[in-house]
Amino acid sequence: MLEPGEARPGRVQMPPAFAVKAMTEDTEGRFSLLEVRLERDIPRHTHHVADECVYVLEGDLGVDFDDRSLTVTKGSFVLLPHGVPHALRRASDPPPRVLQISSPGGWECYLADLFEAGPSVLTDGALDPAKINPIAAKYDIHYEVPPKP
């Protein structure tokens, strides 16, 4: 049982935008559940094992899914199956707040590794796919690296 605003503690202090509600270890590996406020756009990437489920609690979430671009509004749900490239972006201000389920679990472990890496995964304040990929590979996630001009 978690009260409003509470999150499960992990090995790394998560920023307030990422509240872990159910850890992979809580569900015997079946899933992890986070409440996320999308403050940064998430570059195009593919989960090779995990399916990602996103339910929008507040705001509008931009989803680039395979070859489509959608705006997912409050109360809407989107399933992002493994193997399908996708990106997530802010489509409202304030940023969208979502429930995110990953199955099997492990998403919170990936985020812990990413936040532990700190600013080393950023370029000019944005997530850099080339810098994220070495961390993401451990979790069967791959970010598309745009070609250099």
Image (tube, grey):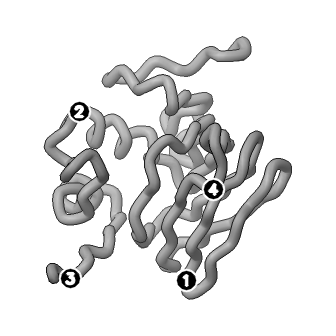
Kindly identify the residue that appears in the image at 25 percent across and 74 percent down.
145
- Sequence-wise first label, 1 or 4: 1
The picture places residue 103, in percent across and down from the top left corner, at: 58, 55
Q: Which residue is mark 2?
A: 116
Label 2 CA crowd tier, 10 Å (few <14, some 14–19, many 20+): some
Q: What's under tag 2, amino acid-wise?
A: Glu
Vertical placement of residue 51 versus 97, above or below: below
User: Gap in Å between the C-alphas at discs 1 and 3?
Assistant: 19 Å
As helix, strand or loop, the secondary structure at mark 3 comes to loop
Q: Which mark is residue 28?
A: none
Q: What's under tag 1, amino acid-wise?
A: Asp
* Rendered-image quadrant of the C terminus: bottom left
Kindly identify the residue that appears in the image at 23 percent across and 33 percent down.
116
Q: Which one is in front in this view, the residue at disc 4 or the one at disc 3?
A: 4
User: Gap in Å between the C-alphas at discs 4 and 3?
Assistant: 25 Å
Labelled pair 4, 2 in contact (Cβ < 8 Å) = no
Kindly identify the residue that appears in the image at 71 percent across and 53 percent down.
60
Labelled pair 4, 3 in contact (Cβ < 8 Å) = no
- Sequence-wise first label, 3 or 2: 2
Q: Which residue is mark 1?
A: 66
Quadrant of the image occupied by residue 19 = top right
User: Gap in Å between the C-alphas at discs 3 and 2?
Assistant: 27 Å
**Left or right placement of residue 128 versus residue 111 in this view:** left
Q: Which residue is mark 3?
A: 147
As helix, strand or loop, the secondary structure at mark 1 comes to loop
As helix, strand or loop, the secondary structure at mark 4 comes to loop
- Sequence-wise first label, 4 or 2: 4
User: Gap in Å between the C-alphas at discs 1 and 4?
Assistant: 18 Å
Q: What's under tag 3, amino acid-wise?
A: Pro
Q: Which residue is mark 4?
A: 91
- Sequence-wise first label, 4 or 3: 4
The picture places residue 147, in percent across and down from the top left corner, at: 20, 82
